[in-house]
Amino acid sequence: MDRPDLLMIVPMPEPVVAGLAQDFTLHSLAEAEDADALLARLAPTLRFAVTSGRCSASLMEALPKLEVIASYGVGYDGIDVDAAAARGIRVTNTPGVLSDCVAEVTLGLMIALAHRIPQADRYVRESRWLQGNFPLTAELTGARAGILGLGRIGKEIARRLEAFRMEVAYHGRREQADVPYRYFADLEAMARAVDWLVVIAPGSSATQGIVSRRIMEALGPEGCLVNVARGSLVDEPAMVELLATGQLGGAALDVFADEPHVPEALFGLENVVLLPHQGSATHRTRKAMGDLVVANLLAHKRGEPLLTPVT
Ligand code: GLV
């Protein structure tokens, strides 16, 4: 059987490697003793590559026969898609299969922040309950949420917020015809009108720093920020300062500007819940993402249309 070369730009989870190894000859850039030598050897013929959200224009330039880059993940802000399009390189991602999971984690973060679940858990473990009851907390029911980015994942979050009888609004580049939620053309106006600002827009040059100090000040001392998109969307130093001084009520964060580095100033704050980029990190969802990566590459190998193309 024909097993063409395939470059793994970043290390891939074992099930994806096993799935790809049946139909491709794999080469790992991260594990190569001499990455430049590997690229030089593959350059004359390499057509397939797999990554997880990252591929620079210079890497594409080093691989002139490259036809397709399959990315394990929905966000592709680290892939130079303009350079790919200019070279006729197809890029695929894994939309859809992770929306439920990310929405579930989002609600989990919000519940954890409102009900102070991490603190309450520690309260029990440290036997402090014996001295008295845990302080009363906030709740989600009836509160107002504004979603920044009402795409596939944003809509799944909205459905779950509705189940909590929350009032849902959204901001995006344009108003959507067939959604029942109030549209705000102005993000600051939405931030002022809601209790929770949920960030789930794609990372890009257009959204870089979109949740600025001004937006967080509009959300205010009673407002909570939830970021399950990319750290790049939020002015992180301003967020830390506003949280520490009580000018922003709270934050539930799955993503950060410089992962896995998290501003240490957040560690001592009681009004934050922090996750290590867990949005899609379940066995079920990661399997579905891996299967979609393999299916895209196999479709291209067979000369069939890509299942989930970006470019
Ligand atoms: C996760 O952050 C993804 O982009 O899939």
Image (cartoon, rainbow, N blue to C red):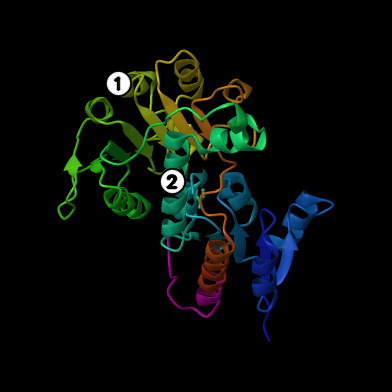
Is the magenta region chiefly helix, strand or loop? loop
Residue on which disc 1 sits: 218
Q: Is mark 1 within 8 Å of ligand 1?
A: no
Q: Name which residue type carries label 2.
A: Thr
- Quick check: marks 1 and 2 in contact, CB under 8 Å? no
Q: Report helix, strand or loop for mark 2.
A: helix
The residue positioned 75% from the left and 52% from the top of the image is 30
Q: Is residue 183 left or right of residue 289?
A: left
Depth check, front residue: 51 or 213: 213
What segment carries the magenta color? 297-311
The residue positioned 42% from the left and 29% from the top of the image is 136
Taking the image as drawn, is residue 81 in sight? Answer: yes
Mark 2 residue crowding within 10 angstroms, few (<14) / some (14–19) / many (20+): many
Q: Residue furthest top?
A: 245
Is residue 248 found inside the magenta-colored segment of the image?
no
Depth check, front residue: 237 or 134: 134
Q: Is residue 77 above or below residue 243?
A: below
Q: Name which residue type carries label 1.
A: Ala
The image's mark for residue 106 is 2
